[in-house]
Each structure stands twice: as structure tokens, then as C-alpha cells.
Image (tube, rainbow, N blue to C red):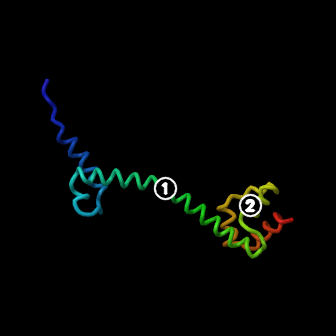
Amino acid sequence: MSRIKGGVTTRQRHKRLLKQTKGFWGIRKNAFRKAKETLLRAMAYAFVGRKHRKRDFRSLFITRINAAVRPLGLSYSTFIHKLKLKNIELNRKMLGQLAVLDSQTFDAIVNFAKA
């Protein structure tokens, strides 16, 4: 049986990887070995970044809620505690949106939680 040379497959794999490293700086975009190292690291950072984005948005929602609740005489933690006691199950994203876009409804929720 004759030997099959793998040049075509290897070239395709290299081209596919080098296409993904378009825009990288210096030799990192056109030397396969450096490009592969850089791409693996970039993918790892991208994976972690998707987790960090969720964390950052949650802290933004909490900041918005806290800023909206303070003038009404509550802190963020006491407000959330009172919501739990009243069995109001609105998540922080929705509360943050209400605080920014619909302050009357948010005030009504706060007053209900206070009572």
C-alpha cells in the first residue's frame, strides 16, 4: 500500500488557524506556531471574558437599584431583604431597568416592600 502524504490536510489546518488570527500584531498573525499560541490564549481570555461580562452587568444592576432606593430611605440590602420577605420575585436586571426607565413603578414596588 502506498503512503499518503498529509501536506494538503496540514495546509488546510494551518490556513484555517491563520484566518482566525487576522488582525493580530506582528508575527503572531502569519507564523503558524506563534499564531497557534496566541489564538489559544485569546480563546481562553474570551471564555473568561464571557463570564466577567455577566458579573459586570450584575454589579451595574445593583448600583442602579441602590442609587434609586437611597432617596426613598432604604439601602440596597434592606430593600432586597424586604422584597424577599414580601415574596416579590423580580430579578436585579428587571429592578435595574425599572429604576432607570420607569421610576413610578419602581417607587410603587419600593413602597409596597416598605409597608
Residue at image x 46%, y 57%? 49
Distance from disc 2 to disc 1, alpha carbons, whole Å, reads 26 Å
- Residue 105 shows in the view: no
Circle 1 — which element? helix
Q: Is residue 23 left or right of residue 80?
A: left
Q: Residues within 10 Å of mark 2 (few under 14, many from 20)?
A: many
Q: Is residue 18 left or right of residue 63?
A: left
- Nearer to me, 79 or 36: 79
Residue at image x 79%, y 60%? 82
| Circle 2 residue | 80
Residue at image x 80%, y 69%? 108
Tally of marks? 2
Q: Residue furthest top?
A: 1
Q: Is residue 54 above or below residue 73?
A: above
Residue 52: % across, % down: 51, 58
| Circle 1 residue | 50
Quarter where residue 56 is shown: bottom right
Residue at image x 23%, y 50%? 33
Residue 14: % across, % down: 24, 48
- Residue 37 shows in the view: yes
Residue 60: % across, % down: 60, 66
Front: mark 2 or 1: 2
Q: Is residue 98 above or below residue 3?
A: below
Circle 2 — which element? helix
